[in-house]
Image (cartoon, rainbow, N blue to C red):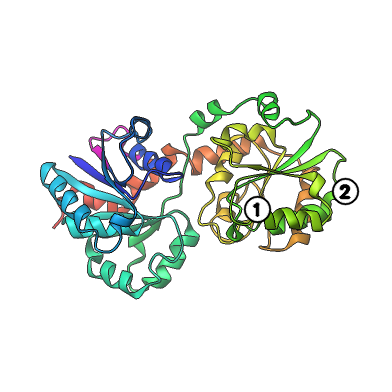
Amino acid sequence: MYVLHICHSYYPPFLDCARQYAALFTNHPYKVVTVYLTGKPDPEVEKISASDEVIFLGYSSKQVRGLKLGAIARIRHLVKSRAFAFCIAHRAKPTYVALLASDLPVISVHHNYDDYGRLTRRILVNYYRKRLLMLCVSDSVRDEMRQHLEHWPAEQIQTLYNRIDVDALKQSLLSRQQARRAFALEDDTYVIANVGRLHRDKDQATLLRGFAEALSQLPANTLLLILGKGPLEQNLKDLADKLGVAGKVRFAGQIPDARCYFRAFDLFVLTSDHEPFGMVLLEAMAAELPVICSNSGGGAEVVAGVGQTFPLGDATALRGEILAAMHRKHDRAHEIQVLQTRFSDAAARERFWALPWVKKISNVHWK
């Protein structure tokens, strides 16, 4: 039997999401056929997808707007060519394609908030509700979706956390010395790091304000290192200058494979406004870093029992957590244990196959 796996695209972070879901079928009798609606064929993407077969439909984003009739026709033809048991579709567009192109049960994976805030979207999924399972990347996203789809049974809107291949990621990490050399950092520099798009949703403005408040009590050689690019870059640089900390803040730009360099850091801080999940937190934990995260969205779920949280947008509270982190004993072994038991491929596989809806569709023919 085959599993149809439809992804809108393979640009980050969705290529890794495709790998995560293909990994659910390790040591299971299903063969996974991953279809990318957009993007040209790429051998490296095919390799990372970790599927039995990868198909690139090659559409542009513009071509899959609206009714997506071409994609629906091609998926319909594909469904007729294999004995597919069910479909996994990431995000709203691939879900619509899967529903309209087949009679398969569909597991719809949701990575963001407000996917069903629109009435038209709710009408479609309500019509096909009997053959839909919604999987959300965090309880925060799940709870918001349950509000939009309030008449759905709770068992049909569930959480399946994002995850990492813990061992593979740890092996990809550069040593502290190598990573620091890449950023031209002195060995004794105390580095507070943030990785993310420079966008208001990531709220690096609060990070700068909290850092500025804490700076007088931090070591003299402290540096705030911000990785990423985005529309607010100049605004944030201007804010750092206004706060008088520009000489202690470095904007490093977009770094390919940034997670490989995390051992260069001493503390990782994520200040996002309603982060649906926060993969970067898992990457920081794999590098055995102490983490601080805003208490908004899925990020707070990721660091529960491991890292520290502060109220969203509260620079003074963030200042307190930054200062406390220097003196708090960091339990690295517990951090890795949490990764293995909650956010690993093995943990996700156990959770996925235990879901009643998945048990139902994997054991009987859909009717």
Choose top left, top right, bottom left or bottom right for residue 180.
Answer: top right
Q: Quadrant of the C terminus?
A: bottom left
Neighbourhood count class around disc 2 (C-alpha, 10 Å): few under 14, some 14–19, many 20 upward: few
Q: CA distance from mark 1 to mark 2?
A: 26 Å
Residue depth check, mark 1 versus mark 2: number of the one nearer the observer: 1
Query: Is 227 on the left or on the right of 9, as rendered?
Result: right
Q: Residues within 10 Å of mark 1 (few under 14, many from 20)?
A: some
Tell me: 67 left or right of 168: left
x and y percent of residue 311 in the render? 68, 62
Horizontally, is 240 left or right of 120 in the view?
right
Local secondary structure at mark 2: helix
Could you tell me which residue is drawn at 32 percent across and 50 percent down? 60
Q: Which residue is mark 1?
A: 233
Which tag, 1 or 2, sits closer to the chain's start?
2
The N terminus lies in quadrant = top left
Tell me which segment is drawn in magenta: 24-34
> At 34% across and 59% down in the image, what residue appears?
92
- Marker disc for residue 217: 2
Query: Mark 1 is on which residue type?
Result: Glu
State the residue at coordinates (47%, 42%).
163
Q: Residue furthest left?
A: 80
Residue 64 x %, y %: 29, 56
